[in-house]
Image (spheres, helix red, strand yellow):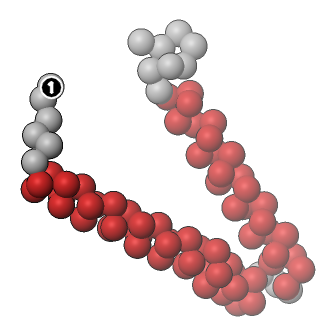
Amino acid sequence: MTYNTGRADKKYLFGWVMYDFANSAYTTLVVTFIYATYFVSAIAEDKISGTALWSRSYHYSHICGIVVPGSWGPGRPGGA
């Protein structure tokens, strides 16, 4: 596979880097501050149990994000 390293490709890559940077920041802010605050104050029974439930679900989702892709990928034991 060959790559063209011309100026157009650098502009294209820079555009995607800026998009990813902005999208990551937006997602992080929404999930960390806005939705967490909404969950704790509006969905949960009280703030203490809401904080505990939010924290547990957040950590479980990260554990799944680490374990599941590793078990599906080509580097898994017995995988191709």
Image quadrant of residue 22? bottom left
Residue at the outermost right position:
48
Of residues 13 and 71, the one nearer the viewer is 13
Asked if residue 69 shows in the view, the reply is yes
Q: Give how far across and how far down residue 68 sits, in percent.
A: 57, 37
Image quadrant of residue 46? bottom right
Of residues 19 and 6, the one nearer the viewer is 6
Q: Give how far across and how far down residue 48 sits, in percent.
A: 89, 80
In the figure, is residue 46 to the left or right of 33? right
Residue at 80% across / 77% down in the picture? Answer: 50
Q: Secondary structure at mark 1?
A: loop
Specify the amino acid type for callout 1.
Met
Query: Is residue 76 positioned above or below 63 on the image?
Result: above
Residue at 85% across / 85% down in the picture? Answer: 47
Image quadrant of residue 80? top left
Query: Is residue 73 positioned above or below 21 on the image?
Result: above
Query: Is residue 67 positioned above or below 43 on the image?
Result: above
Count every numbered label the image shows and give the total.
Answer: 1
Q: Give how far across and how far down residue 17 sits, in percent.
A: 33, 60
Residue at 48% across / 14% down in the picture? Answer: 79
Q: Quadrant of the N terminus?
A: top left
Asked if residue 43 shows in the view, the reply is no
Q: Give how far across and how far down residue 62 sits, in percent.
A: 65, 51
Which residue corresponds to mark 1?
1
Residue at 56% across / 27% down in the picture? Answer: 71
